[in-house]
Amino acid sequence: MTLRQFLRILVQAQRAIRAYWTNSVFIVCAISLGIAALTVILASMEGASRKAEELAAKFGPTSINIIGGNLVEQAMASRPMTLTWNDVRRIGDCMPGAERVSPLLLKAAVQVQSGGRRHTTDSLVGTGAEHGPSWGWYPETGRDFTREDLELARSVCLIGAATAQVLFGSADPLGRIVVVDRVPLVVIGVLTRQGLSSGDMDFDDRVTVPITTMIRRFNLSRHYLSQVRVTFAKSSTPQHMAEYSRQLRGLLRSLHGIQDGAADDFLLVTMQDIMDFVDVVKGSIVIFLGLVAVVTMLTGGFTQANLFYLAVTDRSVEIGLKKALGASSQAIFVQFLLEAVLLACLGALAGLAIGAAFGALLSSFDLLSISLSPTVFLLAVLMACAIGCAFGVRPARKAAGLAPVSALRGLS
């Protein structure tokens, strides 16, 4: 078959699609649903991977968070605080690679007001000096805590971007007074927006104060801490971090007097733990959406095949006339296969549009992180072409195999 003949058949296939537009619409709709599901899967996988990398970068690849309490055997509300200031001192003394050991106190759901505006912020947090380097979270405007703020237990605070928006709108919060649980504090900085949340807690909706201020002014425990963050040298490799984590666990078990075989009364969280958790969540999403995509694509393929079988019967007179006028079986086969592939490509474009719109909807509700890329587009189109070819071959063979005489019986 020459190129000229192929182009002529391609034009005829396009005309047939327009002529039998009802069948064409049903086929496009059936295929587009499968491609839409596939688009959401691929885009969510890319989005989850980027989100994991972003989350890991914000957490810090050379940091370990220590959370007090047994998170496996005890619920959040009943979990006792097990980390102490002695743990902070001993970690600093006994862990040779530790550059910073930063304690943290946390109080949830705190009333905040400024001027005439009231707000219940998700958390009140007390940290040590140099909040930015310790937690990898720097003020976007204003300044960080200093050692003088900590030593003098000054009534100063850093507020999250969401808290600043609620209390001050577009006004500059620096130097303004906020009252937190009837304690007045001067805003010295607004933290960079993180865009992260944990359960119902928005990381950007918080008030952060020096930990000494939190202990003295908010009557919290002077002995126990909610978390401790240990930061190691930036040159530390994943192998180093795994060894540091092992040493840190052994040190804390010794400090807390935990016997061999007993469960830890703390939890160590590293960047690798976060990546592993994201991979598990991503895998669950991909399995669920993958099953949906397979079912919808197979449904679209079978719908296409059945409609093409019916089309062969309805167009038997057309096929007979073409063969009577000299069209070869190969030309008939190629035309019907081209129709299947063209309709599959149209279904791919419609499916990509539906998938992108649905993905944007999920992203707007923070249900899923979606990232569309040329790779997603290419894979969706290739899958659509594969569906068109796989489910279009048998109907095309049936059309090509019709005898002219039997095909023309419909004229009588």
Image (tube, rainbow, N blue to C red):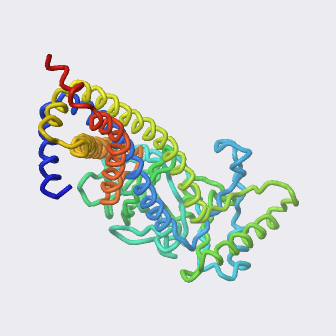
Left or right: 263 with respect to 59?
Answer: right
The answer to whether residue 343 is seen in the rendering is no
In the rendered image of this protein, does residue 299 appear above or below residue 344? above
Q: Quadrant of the C terminus?
A: top left
The residue at 82%/67% (across/down) is 254
Pinpoint residue 179: horizontal percent, then vertical percent.
41, 51
Residue 82, picture quadrant: bottom right
Q: Quadrant of the N terminus?
A: bottom left
The location of residue 55, given as percent across then percent down, is 47, 61
Residue 344 vs 29, above or below: the answer is below
Residue in view at x 69 percent, y 47 percent: 79
Q: Answer with the quarter of the image where residue 190 lies.
A: bottom left
In front of the other: 380 or 213: 380
Judged from this view, the residue extending furthest toward the top is 412
Depth check: give the residue in front, 143 or 317: 317
At x 67% / y 42%, what residue is drawn? 75
Vertical arrangement, residue 143 with respect to residue 201, above or below: below
Query: Which quarter of the figure has residue 217?
Result: bottom right
Work out whether residue 27 can be spotted.
yes
- State the residue in front, 353 or 215: 353
Vertical placement of 235 versus 407: above or below? Answer: below
Picture coordinates of residue 160 (x, y %)?
Answer: 40, 57
- Residue 402 placement, left or right of 108: left
The x, y position of residue 404, in whole percent, is 21, 31
